[in-house]
Amino acid sequence: MPPAAADAPTTRRRVRLRALFRRHWPWLRWPLLALTALFVVGVGLFAYLWFTVKLPADPPLVQSSIVYDAHGRQIAVFQQNGLHEPVPLTRISPNVVNALVSTEDRRFYEHHGVDPVGTVRALWHDVTGGSLQGGSTLTQQLVKNSYLTSDRSLWRKAKEAVLAIKLEQTHDKNDILDRYLNIVYFGRGAYGVESAAHVYFNTTAAQLSVDQAAFLVGVIRSPTALDPATNPDGARRRRDEVLDAMVSAGKLSQADAAQLKSQPVEAAPRDPQNGVTVAESPWFVELVREQAIAQFGESAVYGGGLRITTTLDLDAQHVAEQAIAKTLDQPDDPQAALVALDQSGAIRAYVGGRDYNALKVDLARGKDGGGSGRQAGSTFKPFVLAADIENGGTAGQRFDGPPTITLPTSSGPWTVSNFGNESFGNIDLIDATVHSVNTVYAQLVLQVGPDKAAALAHAAGIASDLPVEPSLTLGTGEVSPLELADAYLTFAREGQRVEPFAIQHVETSDGRVLFDAHPKTSTAMKADTAHVVDAALQQVVQRGTGTAANLDRPVAGKTGTTENNGDAWFAGYTPNYAAVVWMGYPDGSSHVMDNVHGITVTGGTLPAKIWHDFMSAALVNVPKATFPSPPAQLLQPPSTVASTPPSTVVASTEPSTTAPPASQPTTTAPPTTKPSTTTTTTSTTTTVPN
């Protein structure tokens, strides 16, 4: 056949195509021009982004901060939006990598940050308003999670693509996998595969099996909806899809996949705290959290991976909680708080109430813990005694202790009654402390001055405001168990006050030391003054109102009970350990403890019992020690005894509950040791139990 004849059909086809093109060009030119323009704009946009968008510095991985007790036992985790426990890729099971690449980005090791087919598909659906498509590579997902917001816009996806390409130019594939697997969210508050392994399977990332890895990779798409605790069927279907993807990618045999798919997803029960871990002493943990944020900042505490070693001794903490729970075992029992400090000021046990979930107020801190302070009752008397010794008095001073006494103050007559309207005759300050004699201490506070008593209490560790008035001697000032323990520890430390502390040591996750505790100390009183108080308070426990707290070692302590039995205290110490127990109702003004387990609660009853039970166990491994003896002259009567006009003392047959007047330190003469029978018609009265 001649060549011309052979070319004839081809020529005719070309003619027909040109004719067809000319006929349809008016209709085709606009879409083609639009696509061309779109392509040019896309190239220009890409070029603009390439030169203007810089790859940010790698953000530090967010790590949870872990809180330990004094012996290295974990008690809590501080995290923001969940748990963060980064691990290197070498400590992540290859099963996880195989499942992830097979399912999310099968061409991960071939592309350079962007998979063109997937990206075009996603962009087309975004532009045309269709359903948003994934189409993102693992590198793009990492970029989005690390550098960009989660908004769904064309501009964001374009920046994502540019940054993904740049990221792959500076990081190898293993670096990208490492970072991705340590920041992606798996649900249940877990960020990163190590945390996910813990919360779902109680294991580590290195030990994840094929089916566990398949589940975790599958749950990334929809962590909440695919939780096996609430949607076991959906979780299983998604895991099976990942197993099938692994088969298609050649990472798993069909037979192995079939065997694994026959099993349910066996995950651990869901933690109702959603990954937030507070395992022990929630009141103490909250105190540590507040102090850590004040010192290191929120970002460091929640995401800096700090390792915070506290002063808490879990053994002592458990004993404290058990002592309270064993004594107060009924739902309607009063609340209780306990704080224990060792000689260094370290907080070793800390109970802010009987039930943290039911009562969010920390009763151990009072106002600082969201509640209110509590009147100290007779636990305040040792500060009045110490103030008098500091100002030249002795414990051998003798006073009359009638059932009721009326004393002149700058605000008018002040009448004070003993608990139970009991008379004690003429006694020295040691016996007045042993039996908590109100009428003697009313005379003593006027002798030394309420201002001096308040100043000494503040120096010893009472941070709360105190009323500078005579009734201060009866504990009308409000304090917290923590500050009262601090102040009583000052007596044990021979007058040297140390600031209580909860945080002992802080390191970064890589072992760099950020903080070591060096608590502040100061002199609150002379050592001999503290020794006198020690001697008096030892007698309280041996033969006075605090015998229920007696131990097999030297103990000093004081009971305290407020009017109408609204608050009850026992504050005590050994030479190397101090503890305070408070009992009462948070709304103490409307509740009295007149029938708790069949008794009326005073400081010497249930609080002293709790203190005894706690200290008996907490001090097992603490060496026994003795208190230094005070100088003999401080236990003897002074050479001269001042007196007040005899008309100020009044005998009475009934105690009164009227509140005392507020007044400034009086300038009247000191009290006498001899009662009078003269009556006073205008007075205010106070009765405070022991």
Image (cartoon, helix red, strand yellow):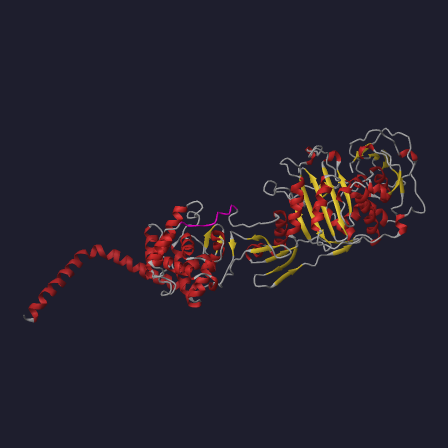
Total marks in image: 0
Q: Is residue 534 left or right of residue 197?
A: right
Q: Residue 138 location in percent, x, y?
A: 40, 60
Q: Residue at x 51, y 45 (%)?
A: 272
User: As displayed, is residue 5 above or below residue 237?
Assistant: below
Q: Hey, which quadrant is residue 605 in on the image?
A: top right
Specify the segment rendered in magenta. Answer: 264-272
Q: Quadrant of the C terminus?
A: top right
Nearer to me, 501 or 685: 501
Q: Quick one: which residue is furthest to the right in this view?
A: 639
Q: Is residue 668 left or right of residue 142?
A: right
| Dominant secondary structure, magenta | loop
Q: Is residue 270 left or right of residue 26?
A: right
Q: Quadrant of the N terminus?
A: bottom left
Q: Residue 218 location in percent, x, y?
A: 40, 53
Q: Quick one: which residue is furthest to the left in this view?
A: 1
Q: Residue at x 78, y 36 (%)?
A: 689
